[in-house]
């Protein structure tokens, strides 16, 4: 059965599906191709990759083999930290486009706000947008103060900010800031790397609505106007994650999930990040 995933209309009118498949840590070629193919087959129309994931080639291959029109699939990729800066970003994009084997990318993001470079990185993303090599310019892991620095130099505002977001890190202030500036929010690690699945409140709501904990959390995101990119190579889970458009959480259930927030991260803080790769 093919599930139709609703879309969010971005600042420039482009439609972005509310759910996509994240492919972080998918390093086995066959497994990656199988996961993406399965996702596309059952209704996913967005794939989220990055230069860092080393699977852009597989993403492009799976899309070409799917038999689905390129225009129907929303592809996101990102420029890695070591490739940031104006000219460097333009070069990195060219490399990503070649690996993907596509003529354009739907959404291109700064992966992390590298101090002294992230504003120039975004200016390069703007240029790619002006040249119609990307359909949407965006950023990820940007706090409000990072976004304000970008705003000061940008002609076209970022239209998407992809951040860590789940019930234990609900990011209400950042979401409100993004909403005010017409920036769509995408949640990476929408299930908090599985930690949140064990939460008592969420388990209780799952039994109330007859759904799994993962489905409840993904539905909570959707009802909060947040785009999600849950990652999985398990075919049954890819199917489970998409099955959230046939039920609704009540205002009370949403409020109870909102209340489990602990401002607790499973990943790095954009104000204090360091990667050894």
Image (cartoon, grey):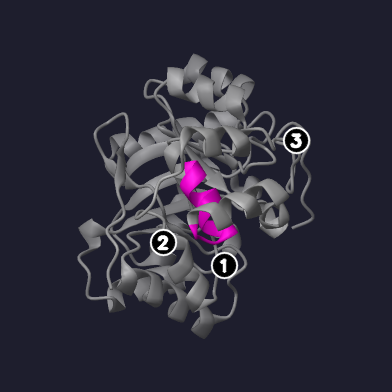
* Numbered disc 2: secondary structure: helix
Q: Quadrant of the C terminus?
A: bottom right
Q: Is residue 85 visible?
A: yes
Between 1 and 10, the residue placed more toward the observer is 1
Q: Distance from label 2 to label 3 (Cα)? A: 26 Å
Say which mark, if any, is on residue 242.
2
Q: Which residue is mark 3?
A: 262
The quarter of the picture where residue 61 lies is: bottom left
Q: Which residue is mark 1?
A: 54
Say which mark, if any, is on residue 147.
none
* Numbered disc 3: secondary structure: loop
Mark 2 or mark 3, earlier in chain: 2
Q: Main secondary structure of the magenta part?
A: helix
Which residue lies at the image location 43% right of the left edge and 19% below the top edge? 181
Q: Are marks 2 and 3 in contact (CB under 8 Å)?
A: no
Task: Please state the extent of the stretch shown in magenta in the rendering.
Answer: 210-221
Relative horizontal placement of residue 264, taking residue 203 as reference (left or right): right
Report if residue 212 lies within the magenta region.
Answer: yes
Badge 2: how crowded within 10 Å, few (<14), some, or many (20+)? many
For this orientation, the residue located farthest to the bottom is 30
């Amino acid at each position: 059965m093919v599930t139709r995933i609703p879309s969010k209309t971005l600042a420039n009118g482009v439609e972005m599906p509310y759910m996509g498949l994240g492919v972080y840590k998918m390093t086995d070629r066959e497994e990656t191709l199988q996961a993406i193919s399965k996702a596309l087959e059952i209704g996913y129309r967005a794939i989220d990759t990055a230069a860092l994931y080393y699977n852009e080639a597989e993403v492009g291959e799976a899309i070409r083999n799917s038999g689905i029109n390129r225009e129907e699939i929303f592809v996101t990729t990102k420029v890695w930290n070591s490739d940031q800066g104006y000219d460097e970003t333009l070069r990195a994009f060219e490399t990503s486009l070649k690996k993907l084997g596509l003529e354009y990318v739907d959404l291109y993001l700064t992966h992390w706000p590298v101090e002294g470079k992230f504003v120039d990185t975004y200016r390069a993303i703007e240029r790619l947008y002006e040249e119609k090599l990307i359909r949407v310019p965006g950023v990820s892991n940007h706090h409000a103060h990072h976004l304000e620095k970008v705003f000061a130099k940008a002609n076209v505002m970022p239209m998407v900010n992809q951040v860590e977001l789940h019930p234990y890190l609900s990011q209400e202030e950042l979401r409100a800031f993004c909403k005010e500036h017409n920036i769509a929010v995408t949640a990476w690690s929408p299930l908090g790397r599985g930690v949140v699945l064990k939460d008592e409140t969420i388990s209780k709501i799952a039994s109330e609505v007859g759904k799994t904990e993962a489905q409840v959390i993904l539905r909570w995101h959707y009802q909060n106007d947040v785009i999600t990119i849950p990652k999985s190579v398990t075919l049954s889970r890819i199917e489970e994650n998409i099955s959230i458009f046939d039920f609704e959480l009540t205002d009370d259930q949403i409020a109870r999930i909102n209340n489990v927030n602990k401002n607790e991260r499973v990943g790095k803080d954009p104000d204090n990040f360091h990667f050894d790769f």
